[in-house]
Amino acid sequence: MKRYQMLIGGNWVDSVSGQTRELRDPANGEIVATVPEASREDARAAIDAARAAFDRGPWRKTTALERGKLLFKLAEALTKEADALARLEVQSCGKPLAEAQFDVADAANCFEFYGGLATKIAGETMNVPANSLSFVVREPLGVCGQIIPWNYPLLMAAWKLGPALAAGNTCVLKPSELTPLTALELGRILTEVGFPPGVVNIITGPGAGAGEELAESPRVDKVAFTGGTVTGRKILHASASNLKKVTLELGGKNPNIVFADADFEAAVDGALFGAFANQGEVCSAGSRLLVERSIHDRLVAGMVEKIPRVKVGHGLDPATKMGPLVSAAHREKVESYIRIGVEEGARLVCGGKRPADPALAGGHFLEPTIFVDVKPSMRIAREEIFGPVLAVLPFDTEEEAIALANDTEYGLAAAVWTKNLTRAHRVIRELRAGITWVNTYHPTFNEMPWGGYKQSGTGRELGLYGIEAYLETKQVNINLDEAPLGWY
Ligand code: NAD
């Protein structure tokens, strides 16, 4: 068992209170590590360090080229340690190794993307109605508090740090208290490749106290949050203290729409992958499957036939396609939704219980679960379950599919399966969601903006849009007239 410390001002430290938290492998309950349990005091120390590195330290004065090169080095160093990081990620949050390997590679690509973008941050010159040289410069925001969830611990850290560092900000990153280990390893690696002390600070602790301090502190210029919508609302309120800039990446109840003319096998695969990748613990999971009535029964039968291939097990077992849920409490929450679904009158066609295999009894496992006869008003069709539970709803017309898809307070992701190109365009145009797919589900690209409509969040991460969220805009006007103004 490894004993981790937090990264504050370039030093590895315990929490001020001395309290620690034990982290266990969600697949078997074995202790993996202990981490400091940060409180408000630790958050304040981390903010101080980030403030000093921004206000007085070298970071703001580094050239974009230097920052870019450091980000390239970070990407390279991450790639060198990819295997160990992926294994640690599996032990932290449960996901299958192949998915964790993908996450680590994606995180390295994210740093590389923003390393390249660092030198492309540019202002503009405007022709104004005066004898003035008028131009716009882009500057970093300052100290960024970055709060992330447990489902993609390393990748979410990369999405936050990559653009913030490329733009010249300093950061206090607070990973989820459940899964902070790969973020701490990332802290070690970025220190080793030469990021100066205080530029990135990483505190491990709960939302209550440590997280709240980041959201409330008037000494933090921006808070970037990924997590639940209820927490997002609290962050928004807290950030009003100093009107800090806010980006929120929140939940979803995403429609995956299959028309009768879709490629049948591809749609079956896509429906399963959309629902059960990463145990369904994905904000963009295709957790509402809307199926044209004429193929509804056949598609459901096709999924049920394939469900044994979603093999449940320890993420490090190469045969595993679905790992345990992140915690006992989270599994109970997901199970409570399964009970609610049954009580509401939906019909289980597979799953709904813990696996019978005694070898899995020590972990938070749940079988992949599919409900049919789901009505749009049911809670399992409306609320984010954030686990391996798929609700299937039939529709008769394109208009009905669109209305059902948009009948949600969320607007993160949506997908359409059809061979009819004009229909695909027509439907995508109507969907109120920030991330959309045609004939696929889940691919994400560092080059493309990520974020939601409606209550799925505000702002965008990734791509060129992602760096915008970490930049201030300053206008400069240089008077080219030498004579006095002569107004008075
Ligand atoms: P959560 O909201 O419980 O916690 C997220 C983070 O916020 C954690 O680090 C937590 O410690 C911290 N936190 C909690 N309360 C806080 C407070 N009052 N002040 C400051 N920080 C606080 O979410 P979770 O359970 O970790 O993650 C699951 C949720 O995240 C789901 O709703 C999911 O949809 C969402 N999510 C969204 C995206 C996206 O990109 N839109 C990506 C991944 C996860």
Image (spheres, rainbow, N blue to C red):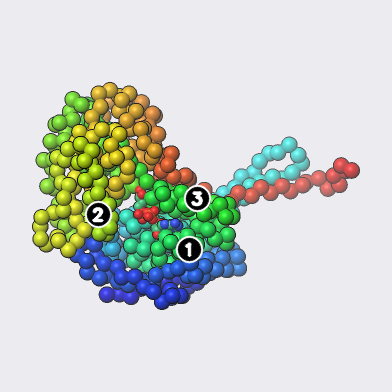
Tag 2: Cα neighbours inside 10 Å, few (<14), some, or many (≥20)?
Answer: few
Q: Label 3 is placed on what type of residue?
A: Leu
Above or below — where is 33 with respect to 138?
below
Residue 63 visible in this rendered orientation of the protein: no
The location of residue 250, given as percent across then percent down, is: 40, 47
* Residue positioned 57% across, 62% down in the render: 219
Q: Label 1 is placed on what type of residue?
A: Val
Which residue has dot 2 on it? 332
* Residue positioned 10% across, 60% down in the render: 358
Residue 360 visible in this rendered orientation of the protein: yes
Q: Which SS class for mark 2?
A: helix
Occupied quadrant, residue 442: top left
Which residue has dot 3 on it? 236
* Quadrant assignment for the N terminus: bottom left
The location of residue 480, given as percent across then percent down, is: 78, 46
Task: Find the distance from the CA under tag 1 to the CA under tag 2.
Answer: 32 Å
Q: Looking at the image, is mark 3 or mark 1 nearer the viewer?
A: 3
Task: Find the distance from the CA under tag 2 to the CA under tag 3.
Answer: 28 Å
Q: Is mark 3 within 8 Å of ligand 1?
A: no
The location of residue 309, given as percent across then percent down, is: 13, 47
Above or below — where is 286 with respect to 364?
above
* Residue positioned 25% across, 46% down in the render: 337
Q: Label 2 is placed on what type of residue?
A: Glu
Q: Which SS class for mark 1?
A: strand
Q: Which SS class for mark 3?
A: helix
- In the image, ligand 1 is in what quadrant? bottom left
Occupied quadrant, residue 326: bottom left
Which residue has dot 1 on it? 172
Tag 3: Cα neighbours inside 10 Å, few (<14), some, or many (≥20)?
Answer: many
